[in-house]
Image (cartoon, rainbow, N blue to C red):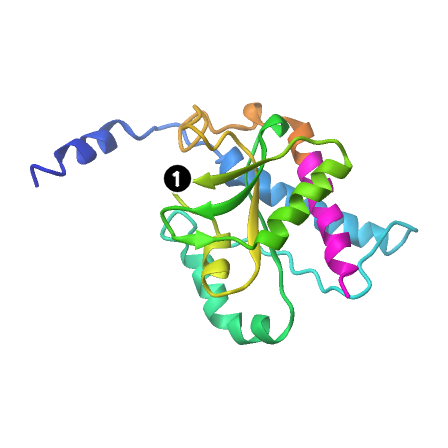
Amino acid sequence: MIAFTPIVALFLIFHTYKPVPGAMDDMSGVAVMAGLGKYLEEARKSEEWLPKRTEVVLLAMSSEEAGLRGAKRYVSKHLEEMKTTPTYGLFLDGIYDEKYLTVTYRELCTGARHDPGLVKMAQDAAASRNWPISVRMIPLGGTDASPFSLKGIPAICLHCQDTSRAVPNYHTRDDTYAHIRPESLSISLQLVLDMLQRIDSKP
């Protein structure tokens, strides 16, 4: 118990009586997913691009902070289906500033190594629009992409977050909408769309 005292002491100050929405982690990712759903619905009524060969599953999972339980449950329930039908997981987490556009290739805590082909696809899609993109490892924590990659389902996680440090609005009472740049949402959505087009055109 003495050894764990410093960790317990941190939790004594890690609280607030003012709830926050978790805007960066991860309401912003959910907002991009909702934007994708809106685009796909409106594209049916217009001449915008629609995937011809790809079924798009819009997936928001719970319990990411509790050991990625939602993602693990989904993978365990649908693994056989995902193994027999070519499946690609494009996950979004920590969207707040487009200058930190990042694709994660590895997550140290979970041991997940994400699909190199999807990492390259994200780089190419970003380069086609002259958007700088970093390729980084996440040293602490984990994303919902991990359970997919660990079971052999190609997956990556896209961020607009400085993952090299603990930013002030990461897991704190400052994680409010005021810190989310609208441009980060639109760029993330366009990057997902561009990758979806590339996936849909695969032979």
Which quadrant does the N terminus fall into?
top left
Q: Is residue 111 above or below residue 92?
A: below
Residue 164: percent from the left, percent from the top?
Answer: 45, 30
Q: Which secondary structure dominates the residues rendered in magenta?
A: helix
Q: Is residue 197 left or right of residue 161?
A: right
* Residue 195 appears in the figure: yes
Question: Is residue 19 toward the left or the right of residue 86 in the image?
Answer: left
> For the point 47% across and 29% down, which residue is it?
175
> Which one is nearer the viewer's eye here, 46 or 121?
121
User: Which residue appears farthest toward the left when viewing the image?
Assistant: 2
Q: Is residue 96 magenta?
A: no
| Rendered position, 35 above or below 62 | above
Identify the amino acid type marked 1. Answer: Pro
- The residue tagged 1 is 139
- Occupied quadrant, residue 16: top left
**Where residue 132 sits: x, y (%)?**
66, 30
Mark 1: secondary structure:
loop
- At a point 42% along the width and 32% down the height, the residue shown is 19
Q: Nearer the viewer, residue 104 or 43?
A: 104
Circle 1 Cα neighbour tier, 10 Å, few/some/many (<14 / 14–19 / ≥20) = some
On-image quarter of the C terminus? bottom right
- On whether residue 202 falls in the magenta region, the answer is yes
Visible residue check, residue 62 = no
Picture layout, residue 149 above or below residue 14: below
Range drawn in magenta: 186-203
Give the image quarter of residue 186: top right
Does 53 sit left or right of 101 as displayed?
A: right
Please report the residue visible at 24 percent of the width from the left and 33 percent of the height from the top.
11
Q: In the rendered picture of this protein, how many numbered marks are placed on residues?
A: 1
Q: Which residue is at the front of the view, 104 or 160?
A: 104
Residue situated in front as seen by the camera: 149 or 95? 149
